[in-house]
Amino acid sequence: MVPHLTTALHGPLLELEQRILDGNTSIERWFRLRWLTHEPPFYCSVDLRNSGFKLAPVDTNLFPGGFNNLSAAFMPLAVQAATAAIEKICPEAKNLVLVPENHTRNKWYLENVATLAAILRQTGLEVRIGSLNPEISGPTELETATGKKLRVEPLKRLGSGSRVGVEGFDPCAILVNNDLSAGIPDILKDVNEQVLLPPLHAGWALRRKSTHFAAYDEVAAEFAQLLQIDPWLVNPYHARCGEIDFQARAGEECLASNVSMLLEKIRVKYLEYDIKDTPYVAVKADAGTYGMGVMMVRDAAEVRDLNRKQRNKMAVVKEGLAVTDVIIQEGVHTVERIEEKAAEPVVYMLDRYVIGGFYRVHGARAADENLNAPGMHFVPLAFEAACTVPDPHASCDAPPNRFYAYGVVARLALAAAGLELERTAPPE
Amino acid sequence: MVPHLTTALHGPLLELEQRILDGNTSIERWFRLRWLTHEPPFYCSVDLRNSGFKLAPVDTNLFPGGFNNLSAAFMPLAVQAATAAIEKICPEAKNLVLVPENHTRNKWYLENVATLAAILRQTGLEVRIGSLNPEISGPTELETATGKKLRVEPLKRLGSGSRVGVEGFDPCAILVNNDLSAGIPDILKDVNEQVLLPPLHAGWALRRKSTHFAAYDEVAAEFAQLLQIDPWLVNPYHARCGEIDFQARAGEECLASNVSMLLEKIRVKYLEYDIKDTPYVAVKADAGTYGMGVMMVRDAAEVRDLNRKQRNKMAVVKEGLAVTDVIIQEGVHTVERIEEKAAEPVVYMLDRYVIGGFYRVHGARAADENLNAPGMHFVPLAFEAACTVPDPHASCDAPPNRFYAYGVVARLALAAAGLELERTAPPE
């Protein structure tokens, strides 16, 4: 069920994983207590990198697509988690509207929407798809990649205008699967009677990666204390620069000095752990997704001498959003390989539960490159025991145990996202 | 993953299953609303019989053993369900004591205890095994069927005596996996500060099958109304007789007239649905388990002419409990076969969630006999999509769909058990 991973394990990771396995009961209790005071977001996917010496999240997505890439065998887990989540949000609810991304021709994305809608329907909700896309002016039938029919309707204000839904259908909750890179649409503003999942400030119109990773610093520090480990083993260094203008070459100094400082910090750690890899950092737009606006840097000089093409690439992300703020993040090499190709695990969560995951695989990218790029493909993982159930009788690098560690680190990012959303919530 | 079932389907069941599949969303919402006002028991297993024209529970177990018979692939579902249940009961809990049956030499039962403890540990609880068995006078290491070590300690009163636990270990909750056929032990009486799961009145010292099936009548009637079906399709007729003494031949008249009445009612239904099978009823001890004290009857005359051996068999159940009350239950033939052998599905639930199941198979028993008897074996089912997720694109008798119907009917029995426990609860 699980593809063979030619993971080249070093000592420190084995040690980290062993600590995580040994700490299973206290880790689960620690999460349970955390969720009592800090709600996780409704859903979340986390890109992890496993470098053989550290295991860390590099991206936390609050509008996960790709539900169709999860192993079908684990749909019951997703349904059960969604049921628990819905019970808390609107226990008596009958209706839910799902707001997708605007792209109507990406059939795999539509497959994701169909999968997500199917999961929600299994919890006993009527689900309709309400689009923000101005091209959708009436009920429209779209076809998914596997030939399923998906009925999409225009999202609209209902009745007196205080509620949102689709024609003749008033939902209790609106599940947003659109990352709002284009800004918060008017139709979703001032919606107070219905629950918006996740809240609007989770969208890239307002969200910042640097705020997320600042929250992650805290969560990782607490977790490291629980396990008595160096927090660096689960946490990449990061810094940020504002007031960047790639086209006008403004802010290059901030970028260069932060890159230099981070590379130096990484070098110190590499010496401490006797790691022979070449340190690198990822420079990413502080707001935005889809792997756009990402650059891998091994030397500060590189960011001082960007050519026109590189500047253009970094200057805008999805929906043409200009990049003015960047996060500089410690690069984590991946040692995971599937059929000789670089791979990184992506873990999916619904409410507080890990529901599955897959490997993102890229045949043309190296271990220190961004795999979230055209040419990537996905290997759905049975995620034997779905990341949550370690097998104390198996060896530490047996798949269920490896995946348990993935599920734990992914949930650290989930907890950070909860904290981030609490702190960035607009005043009531 | 799923054994081939040579299910000989007739029209009506297909019709019933189609209704259940079509009603998926409204059924799930119906359950969701139910659980808002009626809590399910902590755990439960339900024996189902599928006769090709009806699908009904015949036994509801509130102290399920056999967790080791579930497919390991679905352990994450069990862990997730247990996590949700524990959060409600004692969210900050660290410790739980599991009270097993007294038999220390049944290595498969010990395997069940080990599996159950493993599930609970994954939710972040420290779990210790506290035995009622007077032979366990100190920490004792037992070996399970697969060679796991199980440490069992004597259950004892702690500190000032108001709390129960094991030496040096004070639990928040006590999970009872002992059906209390031998009566309620003093050590579990007046335990008010800790949560007993399930409550003591769920034990066979107090519980009656007839009360359960009376509650089931109500749940089945409501469900039948929701689906606009004949409730008989999911509900076997039943009646009860008290003041029976098999040895003294007292109560035979009540038994004979009720058997006669039930057989007549079944005949009328068989005519209505054009069913050619021979009606029969099961006579069972109203309190008790393990398939003991069960007799299949095709004619009222049979219960008037019990020979000594039959009377002895019916007179006592587990722990030598004398049988004074019996339930007479419509027999449901099983049409399920695994490798030509009669089989019946057993569905497991934790809190409100279906977590898996298996087939109980008996090579030497017929379709209208009790399969819960020496010689039975278990075929763990992947329960493709774990009973909870129907596939609207597959045909009605595709395994995921068949299993969805199982999960629905099993949860009806779960809901009945919740109602039963509410109504039989002792005054606070």
Image (cartoon, coloured by chain):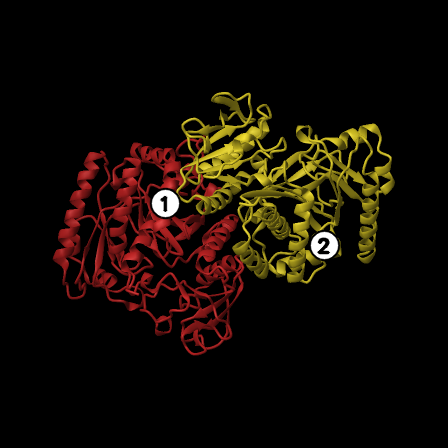
Chain colours: A yellow, B red
Q: Is residue A306 above or below residue A14?
A: above
State the residue lying farthest toward the bottom.
B160
Task: Report in which chain the residue with disc 1 lies.
Answer: B
Q: Is residue A395 above or below residue B15?
A: below
Per the image, the residue denoted by label 1 is B33
Residue nearest the observer in this picture, A144 or B58: A144
The circle on residue A233 is 2
**In the figure, residue B100 lies in which quadrant?**
bottom left
Expressed as whole percent of the image width and height from the top left, the position of residue A78 reads 51, 43
Q: Is residue A283 above or below residue B126?
A: above
- How far separated are the C-alphas under marks 1 and 2? 45 Å
Q: Are marks 1 and 2 in contact (CB under 8 Å)?
A: no
Few, some or many residues within 10 Å of mark 2 (<14, 14–19, 20+):
some
Q: Is residue B185 above or below residue A164?
A: below
Helix, strand or loop at disc 1?
helix
Expressed as whole percent of the image width and height from the top left, the position of residue B269 reads 20, 38
Viewport quadrant of the N terminus of chain A: top right
Q: Do we see residue B243 in this rendering?
A: yes
Name the amino acid, label 2. Leu
